[in-house]
Image (cartoon, rainbow, N blue to C red):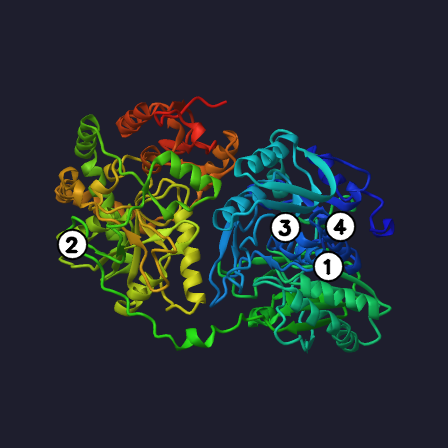
Amino acid sequence: MERGTTDVVWSGSWVAERLGVGLVGDGELRELLGLALRRNPKRAHLLVSNVLGKHVPQRPSVVYGAGVELGRRVRALLGEDGVRRAVVVGYAETATGLGHSVADGLGGAPYLHSTRRPVPGVARAGGFEEAHSHATSHLLLPEDPDLLAADGPGSALVLVDDEFSTGNTVLNTIRALHERYPRDHYVIVALVDMRSPADRGRLTEFAAEIGARVDLVARNTGTVTLPDGVLEKGQALVAQQEAAGDAPQDGGPPHPRPHTRLDLPWPAGVPDGGRHGFTEAHRALLEPVLPALADRIAQALGDGPRRVLVLGFEELMYAPLRLATALEDRTDAEVRYSTTTRSPVLAVDDPGYAIRTRLVFPAHDDPADGPGERYAYNVAGAGFDAVVLVVDSAADTPALHAPGGLLDRLAPHTAQVLLAVIPSYVPGAPAPERQEEVPMQLPEPLRGPAFSSYAPDEVGWLLQDLSDTRLEAPTEEREEAIQSGGAHYAESLPVEYQPSAAYQELFKSALALSAARIARAVGTVTETVLAERGPRPVLVSLARAGTPVGVLMRRWAQARHGLDLPHYAVSIVRGRGIDANALRWLAEHHDPADVVFVDGWTGKGAITRELAAAVAEFEKAGGVAGFNPEIAVLADPGGCVRTYGTREDFLIPSACLNSTVSGLISRTVLRADLVGPDDFHGAKFYRELAGADVSGLFLDTVAARFDEVADAVDAEVKELLAADRAPTWEGWAAVERISEEYGIHDVNLVKPGVGETTRVLLRRVPWKILARRGAGPDLDHIRLLAEQRGVPVEEVDSLPYTCVGLIHPKYTRGATGADGKAVESA
């Protein structure tokens, strides 16, 4: 980057002076990075890159060249043979263009970037969470289902992000991908590596644990020093600045002005980016036509503009960047490049601050997560004679052209707006033989007594019976396989816990003590559902924890209103979504709008998020629309849903046991060799455990208390229907905090609430239990199980849950003793 393109005043000095944030690194670091304040409850500061082309308009040749140079360094690392077998993956949204540029510099490797836009007809090949991001969930949607598979030993996966702050996102990504596509070499690429020494050590340890080589390639290295309380101080400073209203936050009122539209003749068959994969063949088709496309833009602009901004759109970074580099080569105008973004950042009009101005406008691509604000930074007041806004056709919607839309917001700040539209890439139709296949007719639901100990009218299981298949494995063996990426948790089953006589008595005592409280929660959630989703909802439980709750809700509706509600149980798997065939069956037999999903309780809200994403993906893939992904639960201690019986974290006795309180049905199974494309997910019926079955006892004991709690339910429902029940997501925030405080750095290993803690003790390798100080009988069974497994129980103050179970983060069988009990950890 030329020194002439940077300010004399460092664009991080404003934040550094007010918050005490320090940036330490080599001589070029301050030229590469400025600082700004996020409007984000998870992190106070934002590192603002001057060469990324996201927040700061920069010469496109500088932006593209930064990525290409990193790609050449990776090429030198891998060698010719390694390049041919490598795959490059970039992170949405900020690094989609950088990752693609790295792939160009690498040469010969296909490119894929994560996305937050589900696409019809494209199956999800994986996903991961970016905990600190404004929008955390990433999808991987390659058109070629084998794109991410390792091509033998030594085939590298190259992960590209703009900067590393803690390395958590990279660890989450490798965990998720290694689970499905294990390989022995990962290369991590970034413009800047700002991790602390402790964070660097975690990556080294992680590489050793999974038995893979992990290399790091970064343009610059440094550290960010953060004083105590920086998050709270940053939030207060943001509030103060926004209240003062000194900076131009949105560029003023809408200013209607005509714009010119240009449909670019994008080469047929070439994707608009890496959302579904971009290969060398695509690159060979695109490169020769870029000069002609740039000429079309230059012709549409005319001779007047001397300073031009090419503005991309969120994940659509690469196509606008390459158009901008070609325009830079073929015009005398000064060309700059940047893109719009989802990330909310404070704007301060000060030369020592990286985000001087902000344009605010509504999303215009019908995003799956709903409408929301979007932003363009450092565009207003930058003196551009013309702005070339490049969007794909999916984003060329009425919202883009509406008053207050992006085109409207740009108009006051430039003499000319050119809207350049390229066709959204739609992955190819299925092969002819698949088109001619007749889908297999889905079977009818399984029912008791042939499958489960429930009465046949209580629940229909949209599952296939795998009772004769050996699926169980020792707990420690499963834990090692799951955490090392050797297997997904849904590909096997834990050995069913056989409760001792003492534990059985504890269950019965707990049931007697809590039956009225459970009955009240059942009544409250059922009446809320009938009031808001009635008059005849179709209850669909998430197997298996949701199934006893669904049966009880059905019994309440029958006892109080004479309703005979349909009730089914379906499988949902974290990381892989809901059973799409079960949704198809439901759509064939019921109105999707009548379906109400039911679960037992919420922890951190992972299944709540999974269901919402899965239903959106189902619809985008051509499934019947109309399913409401909202979940109704008995208890919502995590603050993740708006339909619940209570938000207290208390003992639900059905959480104390496994199949013996859930109709003798196992947890659900999803394994490719057992579950085909036209099959329901699987489960086992443990007929041999009939002597220990208390499923009926649990249901009958709770239902017997319905009459005595009816008045309390009526009063509570009246209050709830008038109250603000919006999810607070307090549980997710608490889990993130606990994960970091205890050095786990993986939210999937933190299981909050009484129900989830019980599952940890029954099915996983527990590390320790956190119990709220003074918690009473709700934790008697937890303490007994912990004692049996040799797991320490740590009393803590200010715990938002009654208890939290921590899965052992050292996930080899050496992490437990020979007797399977947990050992002391450092």
Tell me: residue 529, above or below residue 660.
Answer: below
Say what amino acid the circle numbered 2 marks.
Answer: Ala
Say what amino acid the circle numbered 3 marks.
Answer: Val
Q: Is residue 821 visible?
A: yes
Tell me the distance, in whole angstroms, between the alpha carbons under discs 2 and 4.
65 Å
Classify 10 Å Cα crowding around label 1: few (below 14), some (14-19), many (20 and above).
Answer: many
Tell me: residue 310, above or below residue 458.
Answer: below
Which of the marked residues, 3 or 1, is nearer the chain's N terminus? 3
The residue at 77%/60% (across/down) is 60
Q: Secondary structure at mark 4?
A: loop
Which of the marked residues, 1 or 4, is nearer the chain's N terminus? 4
- Looking at the rendered image, the disc whose residue lies closer to the viewer, 1 or 2, is 2
- Which numbered disc covers residue 380? 1
Q: Secondary structure at mark 3?
A: strand
Tell me the distance, in whole angstroms, between the alpha carbons under discs 1 and 2.
68 Å
Say what amino acid the circle numbered 4 marks.
Answer: Asn
Classify 10 Å Cα crowding around label 4: few (below 14), some (14-19), many (20 and above).
Answer: many
Tell me the distance, in whole angstroms, between the alpha carbons under discs 3 and 1.
36 Å
Which of the marked residues, 3 or 2, is nearer the chain's N terminus? 3
Counting from the top left corner in percent of width and height, residue 164 is at 65, 42
| Residue highlighted by disc 2 | 450
Tell me the distance, in whole angstroms, between the alpha carbons under discs 3 and 2.
50 Å
Tell me the distance, in whole angstroms, between the alpha carbons under discs 3 and 4.
23 Å
- Which numbered disc covers residue 158? 3
- Which numbered disc covers residue 50? 4
Classify 10 Å Cα crowding around label 2: few (below 14), some (14-19), many (20 and above).
Answer: few
